Image (cartoon, grey):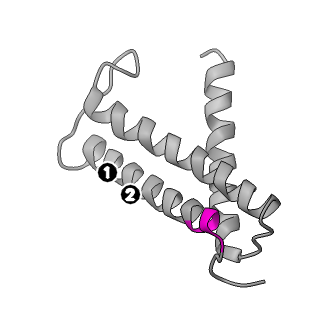
Amino acid sequence: MKALPKTRLGKWSCGLILAFAILFLFTTIVIVGLFKQQGGNTIFDNLFISVPMISAITCAIAAFVTGVISVWKYKERSLVVFVPITIGLLIALFVLGEVTTPH
């Protein structure tokens, strides 16, 4: 088992999960830190919060999909690719739970 990905999709998966981390950190800074923004009743009430967060979630799910394809189809066995798969799966399950379970 190698440490770094060799396939193109494996590298994309790692890049997408890095983009997720950066966007998530930016959203956290916007909410808590510098700008002290607040959300509203719906997700689109404050676009300064929702656009980076939806982009981050999209990056995490795309990292999951590209990671699974690289492992399954191209036999990628690097240790680093399994991190985006795990994080992307957890984010996908969280989003699925938020959509299907009423609050």
Q: Is residue 4 magenta?
A: no
Residue in view at x 49 percent, y 63 percent: 15
**Quarter holding residue 48:** top left
Position of residue 78 in the picture relative to residue 29 (left or right): right
Is residue 103 shown above or below 98?
Answer: above
Q: Nearer the viewer, residue 61 or 102?
A: 61
Q: Position of residue 91 (x, y in %)?
A: 61, 44
- Residue 27 in sight in this render: yes
**Within-10-Å neighbours for mark 2: few <14, some 14–19, many 20+:** some
Q: Position of residue 9 (x, y in %)?
A: 62, 62
Q: Which residues are magenta?
A: 7-11
The answer to whether mark 1 and mark 2 are in CB contact below 8 A is: yes
**Quarter holding residue 103:** top right
- Residue 38 in sight in this render: no
Position of residue 5 in the picture relative to residue 29 (left or right): right
The N terminus: image quadrant: bottom right
Q: Nearer the viewer, residue 6 or 60?
A: 6
The amino acid on which the numbered mark 2 sits, given as a three-letter code, is Ile
Residue under numbered circle 1: 26
Q: How many marks?
A: 2
Is residue 40 shown above or below 74?
Answer: above
Q: Position of residue 74 (x, y in %)?
A: 77, 65
Residue under numbered circle 2: 22
The amino acid on which the numbered mark 1 sits, given as a three-letter code, is Phe
From this viewpoint, which residue is outermost toward the left? 35
Is residue 88 shown above or below 41?
Answer: below
Q: Position of residue 59 (x, y in %)?
A: 51, 47
Point out which mark residue 53 bears: none
